[in-house]
Image (cartoon, helix red, strand yellow):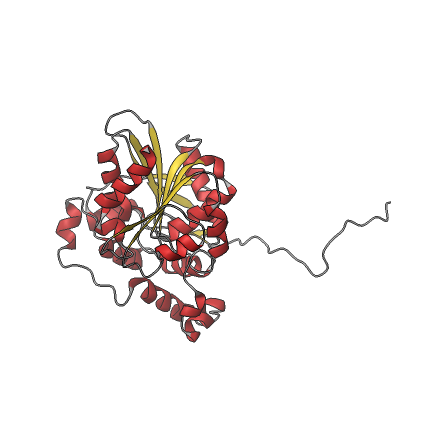
């Protein structure tokens, strides 16, 4: 019997797989839960299964019937994939050959909440599964806010599947020091204070109490996206949603990502960043300092530029695609 022992690092023990008796994910609301609230004017999802959970996917076939451009869209933290529907439709109005796919990130919309830390790699796995399900070897990928920060890291490790990259009002460059001391403490360790940490993060993201427009029901029934109503539905119907939001916020894609952005800016692929002039999350100066040479600013718009100015954002993105 050999006396040779394999090398190892003293004191290191890799985390064990988290298992539960019945499931490794918190189930999302049913599609019927969604339609009973919002009607059936929105695209109907299909569902993908993995060992992390269930992903809801929405396909918008090309209006021309010719799928000559593959487009994948990554939504932000808080509002699900349908929040990007107005922008998707504007892109297809400019490019009828665009086949657009959206999906709900973990813990949002109709996608389940995996019972693991919501670190970047679980979203990279989700993106790759979605691309595989539609049999796309590559795509023009757009990411909004948290989705943009996710795209930055995804492209660094998977550049061959990114035909072009569009960062829309990217998150990731907020300084952790800009949070007050109590919030920093909660982000570092919320043991015994999880509900408080969730409330603080949701309030930060919303900018105050969630206010849903009085006419949300009529607007939703005719297929208009009312982001506040979608978020209220997630809060009331998706028991995993607040836990996903907290985990996503603290696990490295909302703040402290400067070095990833700097490396991304050097990638030899077509890329552009688009943000609102009044965006308090990211500025043109920050991106230029990190090496970005293509940054477009939409005047008099804030972080919600993808919903407040979808026509202008689509025009900029389409221009990059066709230049």
Q: How many marks?
A: 0
Residue 13, picture quadrant? bottom right
Q: Is residue 114 left or right of residue 279?
A: right
The residue drawn where x is 25% and y is 67% is: 209
Residue 234, picture quadrant? bottom left
Q: Is residue 234 above or below residue 46?
A: below
Please name whichever residue, 71 or 127, is drawn nearer the observer in this view of the structure: 71
| Residue 231 visible from this viewpoint | yes
Residue farthest to the bottom, as pictured:
181
The residue drawn where x is 53% and y is 53% is: 19
The residue drawn where x is 35% and y is 54% is: 284
Q: Is residue 240 above or below residue 223?
A: below
Please name whichever residue, 305 or 190, is drawn nearer the observer in this view of the structure: 305
Residue 114 image offset from top left, x and y in percent: 45, 52
Residue 57 image offset from top left, x and y in percent: 34, 40
| Residue 240 visible from this viewpoint | no
Residue farthest to the top, as pictured:
66
Q: Is residue 48 above or below residue 168?
A: above
Please name whichever residue, 16 or 57, is drawn nearer the observer in this view of the structure: 57
Residue 6 image offset from top left, x and y in percent: 77, 49
Q: Is residue 92 left or right of residue 27?
A: left
- Which quadrant does the N terminus fall into? top right
Please name whichever residue, 269 or 94, is drawn nearer the observer in this view of the structure: 269
Residue 61 image offset from top left, x and y in percent: 28, 31
Residue 43, picture quadrant? top left
- Which quadrant does the C terminus fall into? top left
């Amino acid at each position: 019997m050999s006396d040779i022992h394999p090398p190892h690092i003293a004191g290191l023990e890799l985390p064990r797989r988290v298992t539960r008796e019945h499931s490794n994910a918190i189930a999302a609301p049913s599609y019927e839960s969604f339609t009973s609230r919002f009607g059936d004017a929105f695209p109907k999802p299909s569902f993908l299964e993995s060992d992390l959970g269930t992903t809801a996917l929405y396909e918008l076939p090309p209006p021309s019937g010719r799928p000559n451009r593959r487009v994948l869209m990554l939504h932000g933290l808080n509002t699900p994939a349908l929040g990007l529907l107005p922008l998707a439709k504007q892109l297809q109005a400019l490019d009828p050959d665009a086949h657009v796919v959206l999906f709900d990130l973990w813990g949002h919309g109709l996608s389940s909440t995996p019972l693991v830390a919501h670190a970047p790699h679980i979203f990279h796995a989700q993106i790759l599964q979605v691309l595989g399900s539609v049999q796309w070897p590559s795509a023009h990928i757009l990411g909004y806010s948290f989705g943009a920060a996710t795209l930055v890291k995804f492209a660094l490790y998977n550049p061959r599947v990114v035909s072009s990259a569009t960062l829309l009002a990217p998150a990731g460059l907020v300084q952790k020091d800009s949070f007050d001391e109590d919030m920093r403490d909660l982000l570092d360790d919320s043991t015994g204070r999880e509900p408080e940490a969730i409330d603080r993060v949701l309030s930060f993201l919303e900018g105050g109490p969630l206010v849903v427009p009085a006419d949300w029901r009529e607007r939703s029934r005719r297929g208009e996206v009312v982001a506040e109503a979608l978020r209220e539905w997630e809060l009331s119907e998706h028991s995993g949603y607040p836990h996903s939001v907290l985990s996503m916020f603290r696990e490295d894609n909302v703040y402290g990502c400067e070095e990833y952005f700097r490396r991304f800016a050097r990638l030899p692929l077509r890329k552009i960043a688009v943000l609102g002039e009044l965006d308090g999350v990211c500025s043109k100066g920050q991106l230029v300092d990190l090496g970005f040479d293509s940054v477009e600013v939409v005047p008099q718009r804030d972080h919600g530029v993808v919903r407040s100015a979808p026509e202008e954002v689509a025009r900029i993105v389409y221009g990059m695609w066709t230049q």
